[in-house]
Amino acid sequence: MTSQRALIFVSGASCNEEALRHFRQPEDFIIAADGGAQHCLRLGWRPHVVIGDFDSLSAEILNHLEREGVLLLRYPPEKDETDLELALQYAVQRGFEVIRILCGLGGRVDQTLANLFLLGLPMLSDRDVRLEDGEVEAFLIRSEAVLEGAPGETVSLIPLSGAAQGIWTEGLRYSLHGETLYPEHSRGVSNEMISARARVRLSHGMLLCIHFHSV
């Protein structure tokens, strides 16, 4: 595996591009999932590869990307995977341990939910994968996680697949002490950080952590 980060741009309607300008590191490998290439171009970033059926990109943009030497991986419109899932498969095949999905929150509810559920893919279980939009980050907790932020920031813990058991928290206003959260109940929504660092651990299941950062 490689310690280099992969940034995957999604064609999301909600994306704080200004907040993302300071997110990039010089060695980042940039992947655009179809229309996510437009976010890259508006930021002045050249993607290394664009993946998808290209239904969201005009011929003019595709020609520009080709002239810039960007690798274009075209898939048929009728496929079983979303463009983001294809991009994640590519990132895993390239050996990236750290993957950040940008602009994948907001917009159509079905697409946002699908993006979040992709975090549960078995192929991502040993990788650090997060959705970011400049203000919000979402990631999966399978055993333990440390949250970095500021007092007053909102944190929601949502079971992703069945009940999440044996949950312990530190640094959150509403503490959990070896308790269980169920997906059909909303108890884990809208907790609050009371320090610059919080810790969450669980013994069984998966928790979707959604962290709203102060901007």
Image (tube, rainbow, N blue to C red):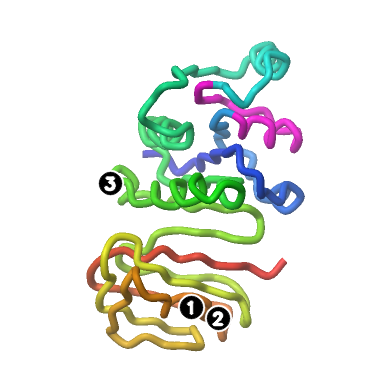
The N terminus lies in quadrant:
top left
129, above or below 171, in the image: above
Crowd around label 3: few <14 · some 14–19 · many ≥20 (10 Å) = few
Q: Determine contact: label 1, label 2, CB under 8 Å.
A: yes
Task: Give the amino acid at mark 3.
Answer: Pro
Bounds of the magenta segment? 35-53
How far apart marks 2 and 3 lie (CA) works out to: 30 Å
Q: Give how far across and how far down residue 53 sits, in percent.
A: 51, 21
- Residue at 68%, 12% (x, y): give it: 63
Gap in angstroms between the C-alphas marked 1 and 3? 26 Å
Dot 3 lies on which element?
helix
The residue identified by callout 2 is 193
- Which quadrant of the structure image shows residue 209? bottom left
Indicate which label's residue lies in the foreground, 1 or 2. 2
Identify the residue at image location x=57%, y=53%. Answer: 132
Q: Which residue is mark 3?
A: 122
Query: Which mark is drawn over residue 198?
Result: 1
From this view, report whether residue 142 is shown above or below residue 151.
above
| Residue drawn where x is 54% and y is 39% of the image | 8
Q: Is residue 118 above or below residue 200?
A: above
